[in-house]
Amino acid sequence: MARFFRALIKAIRRRLIPGERRKGAVLGSSFRAWAPSYSTAPTKLAFRIPGMDYQDAVQTLNTLQTNASTLEQIRRDRERGQTKGSLEAMKSFVHRVGMTIEELDQLAIIHVTGTKGKGSTCAFCEKILRNYGLKTGFYSSPHLVQVRERIRINGKPISKDLFTKYFWQVYNRLEETKAGDSGTMPAYFRFLTILAFHVFLHEKIDVAILEVGIGGAYDCTNIIRRPIVCGVSSLGIDHVSILGDTMEKIAWQKGGIFKPGVPAFTVSQPSGPMAVLVERAKEIGSSLQLCPDLEDFQFEREKLTLGLAGDHQKLNASLALQLCRTWLQHHHHPDFPPVQGTQHRSKQLLTQNPPISPAFCPSTAMVEGLRDTEWLGRSLILKHGPVTYYIDGAHTTGSIKACVKWFREQSLKEASSVKGPVIQVLLFNTTGERDAAALLKLLVLCQFDFVVFCPNILDIAPKNPNPDQKNYTVSLENMLSRCLENHRTWCKLTEMKHDNLWSLSGSTLENSNALVKKGGLDRGALLFNELDCDLVSARALVFPCINKGLQWITQGRDPSLQPALANRLHLAGATLLKEASTIQILITGSLHLVGGCLKLLDQSLSQ
């Protein structure tokens, strides 16, 4: 269908509809009055037909996903240092859409990178500045249920109508200009970044909060030249094939978002990466400062509380406060007037450690913003009758440590308030090149009764496929192989047997490729490790999709899930789960896994 629409687009040669111009919200007479002058004059009309709805737009967007072999080539190019051209390519795409870098300069941007917590930091910033009456734009990744979650206006994903309208405007322009640019189209994430800029300019937002995708220096969000302020959240090891295999190399990439004369803030980091950030700030001409502890911020009326759970969120909240105050100072807000000589510290003052930015008394809008911030898929608890879901998209060692602490505290609190047996289950998967063994080693501390592994596939053969969650960047064989490897790792960590891995369909499943070739997934094969029925310790199971895994865990006790599968399994575990007074399920390891689960568990997110 996507191919049909591309051909149709070429044939009709339509013009794009100029975006409506709106006057930006003004926050007091002291704010700088500005209105981006993004012009749509040279565009063509966007011809709409009944079939060109939101789902068709997402299906067409999915054609821009990079397949696994191409991704491998990109990784090899990055390892050889052939990455600088990526920003030039991004600029070319931006110009083909009809935007200029000068027009992007008019967006009042907060740019945030980091390994852990950059999304939460951005969420805190967005809520705080929205409390000031500003019209906020927020670009983040990945999405959980629907792709339009990545582009938010005033805290909410843009509507399906707006996404569809702006998608075809951008896609048509790029399609029509392919001939003059070697016939290329931007890849998935680049396209969405371009779309976000297009939306923010058309919708006349007051502040744009940009979360870096991967790294910083060569991330496509880094085509911006004049952010108001930059932030670096906690650093760790992640995306090593792209960013490097040491924290110092990763810090160099993250510090690439610094800009000359633009203030930057970071949180406490290990000495090696911190020294790299300091050196990057010196080279670029940015003024890097270290955020104080959240406890140092004194609010006259009440203690600061956070809407996001976990002690690690204190670092993100402190960073958000500094970023928001600097943004407000830049715009001469009466709450935080600029202080001469403190915003841009001399480069000579930066040594191995950046100077600590002084704490301040947060405004009421800041206090309420921190308290009311919500960030879907992070430290989320859903109660469905006797089943409680603990959902956290942690996928690095640092975030898994925080997740384990949060889960143990919250699950113990719940268990102490119920009568009867409580069963704890882990639902886990990882993506990319993450060290799953390191993550599982931390999760062993929770002593789960059952552990379930499954790929980030919602269902084996869904009646209504969801294009928002299609992923063509990894093969089915690779996804299943990862689950089987995670199963083997868990068995080693817990000293289980795994030589009797089997499926209800009778397939030999030691080789995931063989399973796929035999059609086991299509027949709904269920993979698991069956232990002695009298053994009460943790059991490890592997299922081919999220839906089947959750069906088995809940045993028909969650009314939002179909119970059909539960009746087909006759394991000791099924009896334990059916008779438990409470089933506590921790879902973690991958934001994509979290997104699939949320789609099943909260139908409102699909509306």
Image (cartoon, grey):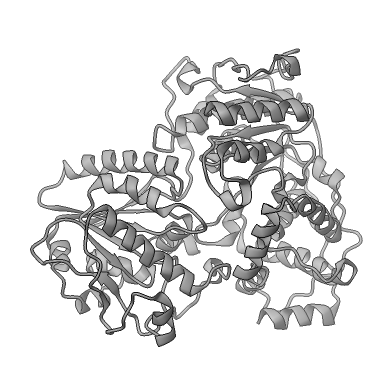
Q: Position of residue 382 (x, y in %)?
A: 33, 52
Residue 481 occupies quadrant: bottom left
Lateral position of residue 353 relative to residue 43, left or right:
left
Residue 231 occupies quadrant: top right
The residue at 14%/55% (across/down) is 581
- Please name whichever residue, 351 or 154, is drawn nearer the observer in this view of the structure: 351
Lateral position of residue 4 relative to residue 271, left or right:
right
- Please name whichever residue, 403 or 383, is drawn nearer the observer in this view of the structure: 403
The residue at 70%/38% (across/down) is 257
Numbered-mark total: 0
Q: Position of residue 451 (x, y in %)?
A: 27, 59
Q: Position of residue 203 (x, y in %)?
A: 73, 50
Figure quadrant of the N terminus: bottom right
Q: Position of residue 359 (x, y in %)?
A: 56, 16
Q: Residue furthest bottom?
A: 518
Lateral position of residue 392 relative to residue 296, left or right:
left
- Please name whichever residue, 34 or 3, is drawn nearer the observer in this view of the structure: 3
Inspect this view and state whether residue 600 appears: no
Q: Residue furthest left?
A: 534
Lateral position of residue 569 relative to residue 283, left or right:
left
Residue 46 occupies quadrant: bottom right
The residue at 28%/84% (across/down) is 505
For residue 249, above or below residue 602? above
Inspect this view and state whether residue 342 appears: yes
